[in-house]
Every structure is written in C-alpha cells, then in structure tokens.
Image (cartoon, rainbow, N blue to C red):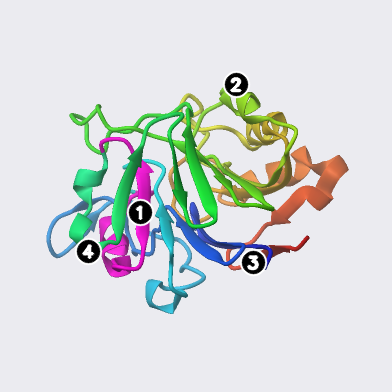
Amino acid sequence: MGLHAAWLGHSTVLLKIEGTTVLTDPVFSERVGVSLGVATLGPKRLVTPALRAEELPPVDVVLLSHAHMDHFDLPSLRSLESRMARVVTASRTGDLLRGPKWAGVTELVWGQSVRLGALNIRAFEVRHWGARVQTDTWRGFNGYVIESPHYRVLFGGDTAMTDTFGQLRTTRGFDLGIMPIGAYNPWIQAHCSPEQAVQMANAAGAEFILGVHHQTFELGNEPRLQPMERLRSALVRTDHRLALSEIGQEFHLAR
C-alpha cells in the first residue's frame, strides 16, 4: 500500500501510510487568526489549498502539533469533524476541540505515544512555544514520529534549531521528514532556516525531505519563494532527497 504524501499548503500534509490516512495541521481558511464574528483578523492566504476540506478522502487521524492559529485552525477542524476520525494533539490543547464530534481526542506529552490501528504516533520535544494567546502559556507543542510496520515518517511541527532530532535516530531511518522551513526572518529563535531544517532531518536519519510552513501565509520577512530556493541549495549534492517543491505536488514511495 506504500507511503503517499501530498502538500496541501502551509503545514497541511495529507499522508496515506499503509492504508491509514493522516492529515497534519489542517488549515483551509482564507485567513488565520482571531475571529471577530463576521471576519477574522490575521494573515490572508496567498495561495488556495490544493484540496478543499470537502474534497479530502475520509481521514483516519488528524495530527496537530500545537495551538497556534496557523496550525490549529478551528473553522478547518470543525469542517473535518467526524465520528470516524481520531485527533492526536499536544498536551492541554484538547479543550479547544469539540471532543464528542470526533471518534476520540488524544493529548500527548513528549515521549508519550498512542497506537491507532497499524500506526504508532509518538510525540517528541521541539523548540517552539504553545500559547494560542498571550495568557495560555501552559499549552504543549510537539513534533511527531509516525511509525507503521514498513515506514517511518517524521513531522517536525514548528521548531527552531534543536538537537532533539538527533535523539530520534535509530538503525531504522525515516523514509520522509516533514520539516518547517519558513518564517525564519526575523523569527529565527522560534523557527528554523531551511539549512537548519536539513541539518535536523539529517540528524534524525531522514531519507527524503518535504519542506512546509512557507509559500502560504506571509509570516516572516523573507521573500515567498526564498525558503524553497534555500532548501534546494542545501540539498544541492543530494537533490534527489527533495520530496516535492510545489503546493499540490505528491510524493509516493513503495517497498
């Protein structure tokens, strides 16, 4: 059945891993930010999603890295609510969800894991923060290791440069590393550069790299296409490792 990934925009990746469908940090809204009832105050989308929520196949697992509004978009999540789908999210973020509308909501702290069918999902420490507004600093924030019998996927969530990725390395490498590569200027203390993303993916032992968290919203001062240009340059001697470069492209791997 293989490993399949489609980048839908920002940090939203549609994964199918040995028959199980996983959706990371779903954001389909025109804007992300604070809802004012009839309008939302926040960054406007620069490019439409590769798929709208209603065009998605049935989703088995929604995987949420943290509660920031460009990763934990409530209108998008409500459009996906299903008693057939499970949510895996960071600690102390489940209160933002309408739990009874889902098959289940599991919060994970660093080092904890949950088994969902053929998949094992484990949370690990990244270098970021979890507050959705200034006062809720107690909320967690995660990266994730997703393992099936034949594949391993790394979802870095949002992170600045950290050595925790090296601690994930085992004799069984990662087939795909989904890494954030945007909003590093001037927010390098909270987000990694493309070169740092490659360094962390290499430390974890990732074979292919999928760069996310860019091209979709203007969150930093770098030019919109610069993150991908720098990612290509960082992989210049191993450019076959670049899983995809455009929103809407697909990656497929079969063993």
The mark that comes first in sequence, 3 or 2, is 2
Q: Is residue 123 above or below residue 10?
A: above
The mark that comes first in sequence, 4 or 3, is 4
Badge 2 is on which residue?
Answer: 163
Q: Residues within 10 Å of mark 2 (few under 14, many from 20)?
A: some
Compute the Cα span from label 1 to label 3: 25 Å
Which amino acid lies under the numbered mark 3 shown in the image of this protein?
A: Gln
Q: Is residue 126 magenta?
A: no
Q: Is residue 98 visible?
A: no
Look at the numbered discs 3 and 2 and tell me whether their residues touch, using CB distance below 8 Å: no
What is the span of residues highlighted in magenta in the rendered image? 70-92
Q: Residue furthest bottom?
A: 55
Look at the numbered discs 1 and 3 and tell me whether their residues touch, using CB distance below 8 Å: no
Which amino acid lies under the numbered mark 1 shown in the image of this protein?
A: Val
Q: Can residue 207 be seen in this view?
A: yes
Badge 1 is on which residue?
Answer: 87
Q: Name the mark on residue 249.
A: 3
Q: Which residue lies furthest to the top in this view?
A: 163
Q: Is residue 88 magenta?
A: yes
Badge 4 is on which residue?
Answer: 101
Name the spot of residue 202 as percent of width and height, x first: 72, 33
The mark that comes first in sequence, 2 or 4, is 4
Compute the Cα span from label 3 to label 2: 30 Å
Q: Is residue 103 above or below residue 132?
A: below
The mark that comes first in sequence, 1 or 4, is 1
Q: Nearer the viewer, mark 3 or mark 2?
A: 2
Q: Residue furthest right?
A: 237
